[in-house]
Amino acid sequence: MKQVLEHIKAAAANHKKLLAVLIDPDKQRFEALPEFVDLIHASVSTHIFIGGSTVAPERTEQLVSVLKGLTSLPLVLFPGDVSQLTETADALLYLSLISGDNPEYLIGKHIKSAPQLRRSSLEIIPTGYVLIESGKESAVQRVTHTEPLKRNKERIADTAKAGELLGMQLIYLEAGSGALLPVPSEVIRFVKNDLKIPLIVGGGIRSKKQLDAAYEAGADLVVIGTAFEKDLSFFNALKKDIHSGFVNPKP
């Protein structure tokens, strides 16, 4: 495909909002995928992200292969480890945990993945990953042995800006899977106003009101995962509307 980043940038420039449904390979039942994908298609979702903090070997590749037969939406890897890489996806968010001080997740995992990615046909998108406290310990925090940033907008904005200056193509503000509190609107707004690259926001969003608040604050793409895992009826609030500001990634 090689067009995922281009599409995100174009949508952001035109103030078109994007929504990614995050599917955790270890939590998704494959037999339920057809019905789940139908709900995605009926919603304003524009991308499908695939990944988790810990995933069984080969599970990611199996999931992506099944999804390929069910949807034409871009399938973007959101991996917690090198073992979650697969050529069957369209793109890879090449995440560097710039909010933490664990070198393994700043560059270590990337070095381990280089031999595989050197030969890869995946669209590789350098992404600055910023973990923000959310009222509970997240899986990302446990796995990476890093502390989330306090909800201090100046420190978060400085971290995001540093990622941009290092050459990241996207910044991802993450409250964490199952977060009690989403990223605050004032933080999103402050960070967005300081960036020249698209901003992704995820974690803790469980209602249309919270989703709209993230968009209004400046998020270009919002990621929702746990809310759909726990309550499929959430899709009802996100059905396609010809007047919506969402844009489909494929004409």
Image: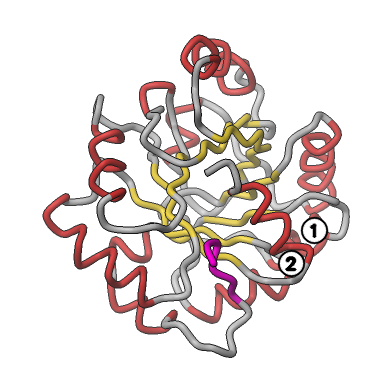
The percent coordinates of residue 168 (x first, y second) are: 74, 35
The outermost residue toward the front is 251
Q: Which residue: 84% across, 41% down?
A: 161
Q: Which residue: 47% across, 37% down?
A: 140
Residue 133 vertical position relative to residue 79 in the rendered view, above or below: below
Task: Give the number of marks.
Answer: 2
Q: How would you rate the neighbour count of disc 2 (Cα within 10 Å): few for under 14, some for 14-19, many for 20 or more?
A: many
Q: How would you rate the neighbour count of disc 1 (Cα within 10 Å): few for under 14, some for 14-19, many for 20 or more?
A: many
The magenta-colored residue range is 246-251
Is residue 195 located in the magenta-colored stretch of the structure? Answer: no
Q: Is residue 244 left or right of residue 35?
A: right
Q: Is residue 20 left or right of residue 88?
A: right
The answer to the question of whether label 1 and label 2 lie on touching residues, with beta carbons closer than 8 A, is: yes
The outermost residue toward the left is 31
Mark identifier at residue 192: 1
What is the secondary structure assignment of the residue under circle 2? loop
Residue 174 vertical position relative to residue 87 in the rendered view, above or below: below
For badge 2, the amino acid type reads Gly
The percent coordinates of residue 146 (x first, y second) are: 57, 29
Q: Main secondary structure of the magenta part?
A: loop
Q: Is residue 179 left or right of residue 159?
A: left
Q: Is residue 152 left or right of residue 104?
A: right
Please name the residue that numbered disc 2 is placed on: 218
